[in-house]
Amino acid sequence: LGFGSDILSSYVFAVVACIVFAEALLGSGYIDKASALSLQYFPLFMVSIGVIAMVVSFLFSKFRIKMGKINNLLLEGIYLAVVVCGISTYVVLNYLNIEIFNMPGVGRFGFMPFVAYLIGLLGAVSLAFTSEYMTSCRYKPAQRIASEAENGTVVSLFNGFSIGLKSNGFFLIYIIIIATTSYYFAGLYGIAIAAMGMLSVVGSIMTTNIFTAFSSNTNKICKLSDESDIV
């Protein structure tokens, strides 16, 4: 139960933040009751969209397995979930028809919640790809660690530690860019929306994290047996 609780709690806090910001804007007189209700319903729609995207990603992964194409399977599922979330959220926002003209902190383009949400989605893609680049054996960071492993355990340990610090630096830069740009397009509510965008694919991310160790061990066992490569 504790595994991944930080991600799930962040998702819940983002939903609560969207609802609280909408209520605060209503109390401050920046929006009317109808707009406040739309802003409060919006994160709930996004939660439903995230569940649908997770199901679509799961069905896509099963189809890829049946086709025998398993390379980069989990990451492709996350990318598909991002596309589903983006298209569905655009449709929902057109349905809600939220128009706010005096939102505090918004730039000259006006209140654009979909742009803030899209920034969060792109941030999720950036985080996923950076993690893949830093850890996959197909890219240079992991290949460099493997090539220098013959120099001893300590060298491998410090190489891996340095790559971890670099990846954290990239993630911090991503968060700063996402927060500032989403604030420009939708104010404080935009930051909460961007957080929802980053966490919309939380189902696929949790699945990837939970089953990575299990699938890795299963793959190693199958390599020692006569099972097929697909297994």
Image: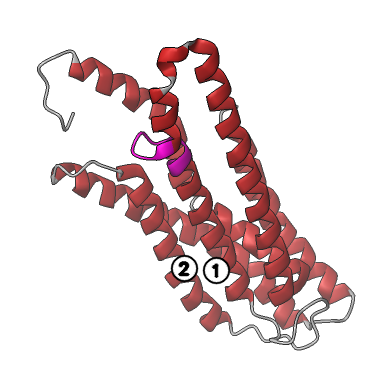
Residue identified by numbered label 2:
86
State the residue at coordinates (14%, 42%): 68
State the residue at coordinates (47%, 43%): 205
Measured as percent of width and height from the top left, residue 220 is found at 27, 18
Q: Which mark is residue 118?
A: 1
Q: Which mark is residue 172?
A: none
The amino acid at mark 1 is Leu
Specify the segment rendered in magenta.
Answer: 132-140
Q: Nearer the viewer, residue 114 or 13?
A: 114
Q: Do tag 1 and tag 2 residues touch (Cβ < 8 Å)?
A: yes
Q: Residue 132's quadrant in the figure?
A: top left
**Of tags 1 and 2, which is closer to the observer?**
1
Q: Residue 79's quadrant in the figure?
A: bottom left
Q: Is residue 175 above or below residue 90?
A: above
Question: Tag 2: Cα neighbours inside 10 Å, few (<14), some, or many (≥20)?
Answer: many
Q: Is residue 176 above or below residue 90?
A: above
